[in-house]
Image (cartoon, helix red, strand yellow):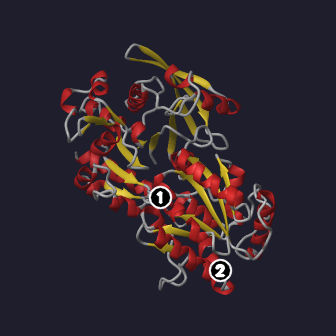
Amino acid sequence: MNNILFVTSEAHPLIKTGGLADVAGSLPRALLKLGHDIKILLPAYASALIKAKDAGIKKISQISIHGQDINILQTRLPGSRVTVLLADMPQFSEREGNPYCGPDGNDWDDNHWRFFLFAKVAQMIALNQTNMNWQPDIVHCNDWQTGLVPALLAQTNSASTPTPASVFTIHNMAYRGLFSHQAFAEMDFPQHYWHHDKLEFYGQMSFIKGGIAFADAVTTVSPSYAEEIKSPEFGCGLDGLLRVRAKNLSGILNGIDMDEWNPGSDKLIQQNYNQRTINLKVKNKTHLQEKLGLPVSETIPMLGFIGRLVEQKGIDLLLEQMNQLLTLNCQLVILGSGFESYELALRKIALQHPDKVSVTLGYNEALAHQIEASSDIFLMPSIFEPCGLNQIYSLRYGTLPVVHAVGGLRDTVIDANSETDDLNNGFVFNEATSENLHQAIKRALACYEQPQQWKKLQINAMKQNFSWEKSARLYEEVYSKALRNKAEA
């Protein structure tokens, strides 16, 4: 069993802006159950400190980095036995707002320095220089915010100062952590790190490149995405480096919390159900229809969408075929927030068609569960999707997804027309056009009119195992590989 330091900028339920938080809140729990000694390292955001109070917070160490005193606090991940270390510094703990941007929506202008200091904290813990009397065998880093950790460890590795093996997980290549040469100059990296094989990226500094270039093993969140990011289309300018590192790159599909997302026991939905009682699912639909002011009908198919209203999620495809969709016998329920232009367009459609479309802007956890349980069909036409969670939640709830065949969507949804009859669980389109999306929706609606076939697809969907234990065992293999790579280096 290994000592693991899991370094992340988010962890549910302490702080969340996206899927990274769900992974960081679940994977460490699964690894702890497998017997590993794992500690999460997280910035001590003001909001996270408030949420951690109930679990108790104590100061366990104080360190100094570039003349700044930083406290290391210890708490527990709420609802678990996982230890959380909080790097307490004013750059995080004395600011309100999003982890990466202020209340005005703009990135903090010192993000490079904040996350550099955070990386230095991780480095010192990794080297057992914090008087904690605990040193990890593995340092598992996640996304650009922690990309400098493997670079720092590579800089300090020597016979006299052995370092743990490092693993770097890419959750989304689109966010590369790009900063100026001036930002690089403020940090204590040797000048030769400003090189296209290291941290330099077309005249800028890339944090995510540090993780990809220096980690002993690199992972991403689905097998298909691991292949896709080695191509120019999905590699965001780093595909060449990823091809160089291909033998140390692997894709592990994210799991989900099978207890939190369980239609049989979900306290946030109107009517619980399972594979045997799937006929009760419709009670959720009629309850949600009434709640949202839509016409109440057991038989009209409901389409759901939950997600960020950004280009990646295929909102343009959805809007481009909206006029055609509105002529079909169905209802559409949307929950999300994002670009103002998308929010305005969707709100306008809902106002013009209140009997067919409901749009809720923002995020509401209870409503998200209710949409998953109520919808018959879930729309996820993402242009790219490293893993995706909502299509997995949908499968769990017997809500059949319509997806674009990319990344984790390709790995989890198998088209109803495929020859693998016992695995088919949704509707897949191959090219990202509005017409292809619309045709897939029409196929799904036609299938909905065939109750026996529809129920078989629902059962196929609901019987799949997306537990974190399965993913955690694959990460154990990556950790072993990282330790071997380091030993051989």
Q: Amino acid at mark 2?
A: Tyr
Out of 115 and 119, give the one closest to the viewer.
Answer: 115
- Camera-side mark, 1 or 2: 2
Mark 2, secondary structure of its residue: helix
Give how far across and how far down residue 408 sits, in percent: 46, 62
Give how far across and how far down residue 341 sits, in percent: 53, 48
Q: What residue is pinned by disc 2?
A: 448
Q: Is residue 342 above or below residue 157?
A: below
Q: Which mark is residue 387?
A: 1
Q: Quadrant of the C terminus?
A: top left
Q: Which mark is residue 225?
A: none
Out of 389 and 343, give the one closest to the viewer.
Answer: 343
Q: Amino acid at mark 1?
A: Cys
Say which residue appears at 51% left-offset and 42% top-offset: 37
Give how far across and how far down residue 369 sits, in percent: 69, 57
Q: Is residue 129 above or below residue 257?
A: above
In which image quadrant can residue 226 be found? bottom left
